[in-house]
Image: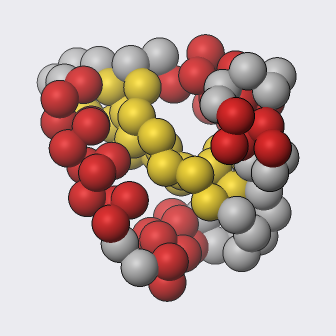
Amino acid sequence: MRRNAFVYILASARNGTLYVGAATNLMKRVWDHKQGVGSKFTSKYDVTMLVYFEPHVTIEDAVYRERQIKRWKRGWKINLIEGSNPDWRDLYDEIAQ
């Protein structure tokens, strides 16, 4: 099944400021954040590390999931990240290869 959209979480550092977003082109969107043009929030707080992402079939599914996660308590978001990325590695370089 083809995945056309993603939900992602960026962090400023381990247990730092978090940002939840959705995109159809994950690599370009994260690159934009890293260049400081992704959003005013991520630029202001230097939130550029891709620490979590999940694929979705449609952008509508991804946006629905994004809104769910945004309503979560911070601890739940941290548990989600650490479930697949316990070291809080920046996944951008790993998936760019």
Quarter of the figure that contains the N terminus: top left
In the rendering, at what x and y percent does residue 91 appear? Answer: 67, 44
In the displayed structure, would residue 22 be above or below residue 59? below
What's the colour scheme? secondary structure
Q: Residue at x 39, y 41 (%)?
A: 7
Residue at the far bottom: name it.
Answer: 75
Name the one closer to the observer, 56 or 13: 13
Image side of residue 15 versus residue 4, left or right: right
For the point 71% across and 42% down, which residue is it? 42
Q: Quadrant of the C terminus?
A: top right
Residue ID at (50%, 77%): 74
Residue 57 visible in rendering: no
Which sits in the foreground, 52 or 20? 20
Left or right of residue 12, residue 63 in this image: left
User: Residue at the spot x=80%, y=51% of the render?
Assistant: 45
Residue 54 visible somewhere in the drawing: yes
67 versus 55 height, above or below: below
- Left or right of residue 22: residue 86: right
Q: Is residue 70 left or right of residue 12?
A: left
Residue 25 locus on image (x, y percent): 47, 16
In the rendered view, tell whether residue 1 sits above or below residue 10: above
Q: Quadrant of residue 17?
A: bottom right
Relative depth, front residue between 88 and 9: 9
State the count of labels: 0
Where residue 41 appears, as percent x and y from the top left, is 68, 43
Quarter holding residue 61: top left
